[in-house]
Amino acid sequence: MSKPALKLRSWPLTVLYYLLPLGALRPLSRVGWRPVSRVALYKSVPTRLLSRAWGRLNQVELPHWLRRPVYSLYIWTFGVNMKEAAVEDLHHYRNLSEFFRRKLKPQARPVCDLHSVISPSDGKILNFGQVKNCEVEQVKGVTYSLESFLGPRIPAEDLPFPPATSCGSFRSQLVTREGNELYHCVIYLAPGDYHCFHSPTDWTVSHRRHFPGSLMSVNPGMARWIKELFCHNERVVLTGDWKHGFFSLTAVGATNVGSIRIYFDQDLHTNSPRYSKGSYNDFSFVTHMNKEGIPMRKGEHLGEFNLGSTIVLIFEAPKDFNFKLKAGQKIRFGEALGSL
């Protein structure tokens, strides 16, 4: 591209290009101007900074008289069912953050005992099935790299040799038992959903990997638009083992959801300015005092988001594992995902 064209490829003109009627800025193409793509324009938005500002705003205590109208508007907009909340009185919630993280009544989400894997949260099933060719579908027809999403199986500094980079080699690090397959399930949490997430099965968490990253929207429309969206966004990957081998749960951040909390991990700090995008931070729960890791029971409280986001399960299981799902269906915490 020529130098004049580079100078003319400005963000303000690009914004006008997408806002004004079609062809209004077409004459500028004669002098070498062309708009930046919508994806590049969206990626340039400082979503991490905006999400931190939103988080501080959420923690501001609302006057008692303002709580009911503010929360009622949110309930009406996103279809929140407050009859399930442990505390239905809207005046009880001092700020938006407390309202987003509201707890449910004890029997609102019975845990299914008949199936080995349950839904860890309320939400919508975006995709599920076997992982093939080390590519995982974030929505139908749009994939991302399994290795880019999870990162190296073992921290590079602990390896006596460089980590394998081929697809087959990476998959063999995850599938530890002969005859097993690798499976995945993607659950999207809308703003009106219950924002806590729970253990989807009986397993032991041995490792946490935190990827600082962007905080772009993860709604299904955006997931179709941006390839490898989940690999760009901030996320917390919990890995460990269940009775059939490797098991992982990843909490993916989104716009205004920079805060991801894992209840047993006090060292985790998400959307922090001290962490730069493009890196990751590892933490092991296996110590000299605790050689097993963190045991989790099916249905046990695991963590929470501060609005709505996405949870991705990736795990190995025997070939006869069957999902009890349909793509696009709504699901609630405690309901069956699949079983042998």
Image (tube, grey):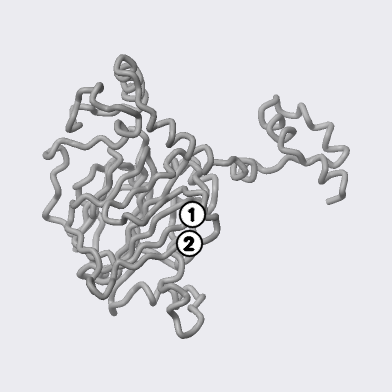
- Residue 16 in the image: state x and y as whole percent: 71, 29
Badge 2 crowding class, 10 Å Cα cut-off, few under 14, some 14 to 19, many 20 or more, is some
Quadrant in which residue 264 is drawn: bottom left
User: Could you tell me if residue 316 is visible in this image?
Assistant: no
Quadrant in which residue 317 is drawn: bottom left
In the displayed structure, would residue 194 be above or below residue 130? above
Checking the image for residue 266, the label placed there is none
Q: Disc 2 residue type?
A: Tyr
State if disc 1 and disc 2 touch (CB < 8 Å).
yes
Instruction: Name the outermost residue toward the top.
Output: 65
Quadrant in which residue 63 is drawn: top left
Which residue is disc 2 drawn over? Answer: 280
- Residue 114 in the image: state x and y as whole percent: 12, 55
- The answer to whether residue 216 is left or right of residue 98 is right
In the displayed structure, would residue 69 be above or below residue 60? above
Q: Nearer the viewer, residue 198 or 31?
A: 198
Disc nearer the start of the sequence (2/1): 1
Mark 1 falls on what kind of element?
loop
- Residue 115 in the image: state x and y as whole percent: 16, 56
Q: Nearer the viewer, residue 198 or 63?
A: 63
Q: Residue at x 51, y 75 (%)?
A: 165
Which residue is disc 1 drawn over? Answer: 212
